[in-house]
Image: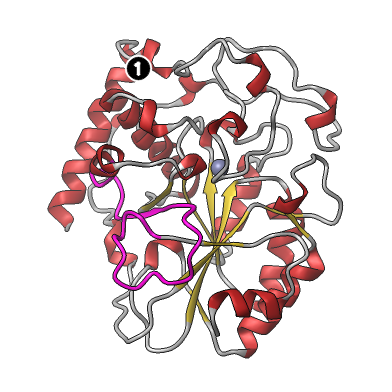
Amino acid sequence: MKKRWRMIQKTALLLSALLLSGCAQSALRPASPSAPEEDSRLITEDGQSTADAVPSTAPETTAPIPETTVPPQPESTAPPPLETIEIIGGGEIDLSADPFAEGREPAGQYAPSALMYHLILEEPYTNLTDLFVRPSEFEDHLQVLTAAGCEFLFAGEYGTTEGRSIILTFDDGYEDNYTEMFPILKKYGARATVFMITANINAPGYLTEDMIREMADSGLVRFESHTVTHPTLTSLSREGLQEQFAGSANRLYELTERYPTAICYPGGTVNDFVIGEATRYYTFGYTTVNSANTSGCNPLAIPRVRVSRGMSGAAVMSKLGW
Ligand SMILES: [Zn+2]
């Protein structure tokens, strides 16, 4: 495992050097740069058509996000440009940091189910209302799951457990994950994983660096990859995939001092080629296949139960088949 990770780290280092040298700049641009219509969308509903993908965050795009899609914000700041991808630690990778050392050694008869959330917010600010689970509903979910003796695992801890276990996942990294979700998580001592679009860190409506650090430091939240710019991975070249995988991993390491070990495929779009490339960087991959049964699944293609607005704790339990 260790050897493999070091190989991955070296690959990441090489890639980063490539990026810095500008050799791969052109590949950083989205596959279809002429898609300003799609760019107006702030929220992505994973699993839907790729036309619903998150806005492109190409550095050359300076057009402001239309008012209707922007959540209440005191001020607007552009997403960080992709040039922020850089070599970690001033060019030196810390080989003593073995990401697998923190892993648990789960063993048991239960395979965890994964739940897919996006936002925890009382009032939806787009027409994708299903994605906005009310805070009271999320609290109900945690109450019921806790009462059922459920163990909360991080996405990077996937494995069999002795009792019932659950993996709470939040896609994209919206701001409410800090303002609404995090306080409820603390109240129950539950643990959750945020799949962060790293180019959107500090962008309007998304988590800031400070929020990410505070959440990660709490020990209750881990940040895993949702790529750099949320592209349709099946349309990318090997080089493009490597930039998305390595770039997001480096950025998260820079912020949390922990390399991600899991990735969530944007829009749930994935194929064998993408998975093959993902295995070079990640141990676990999460899809939008809507199923509670993860038993015997490919660890790079773990299904998740979609949680929608209006679902009670009992409804979640029913979806889980508990
Ligand atoms: Zn997403």
Using the image, determine if residue 145 lies above or below residue 27: below
| Residue 88, image quadrant | top left
Question: What's under tag 1, amino acid-wise?
Answer: Leu
Colouring chosen for the image of the structure:
secondary structure
The picture quadrant where one finds residue 11 is top left
Residue 43 appears in the rendering:
yes
Q: Residue 28: where, in percent of width, then height?
A: 42, 18
State which image quarter holds ligand 1.
top right
Element at label 1: helix
User: Where's the N terminus, which quadrant?
Assistant: bottom left
Q: Quadrant of residue 218?
A: bottom right
Q: Main secondary structure of the magenta part?
A: loop
Work out whether residue 195 or residue 308 is closer to the camera in this orientation and state it.
308
In the rendered image, residue 118, in percent from the top left (x then y), is placed at 64, 52
Residue 105 position (above or below residue 220): below
Residue 36 placed where, x, y %? Answer: 64, 15
Name the side, left or right, on which 163 lies relative to 318.
Answer: left
**Which residue is depicted at the point 65% across and 48% down?**
211
Percent across and percent down for residue 134 are 80, 62
Mark 1 residue's CB less than 8 Å from ligand 1? no
Whether residue 89 is visible: no
* Foreground of the two, 209 or 273: 273
- Residue plotted at (29% across, 83% down): 107
Q: Is residue 283 magenta?
A: yes
> Range of the magenta residues?
278-302
Residue holding disc 1 = 20
Foreground of the two, 5 or 26: 26
Q: Quadrant of the C terminus?
A: bottom right
- In this rendering, the count of numbered labels is 1
Left/right of residue 174 with respect to residue 53 in the rendered view: right
**Does the stretch in magenta take in 301?**
yes
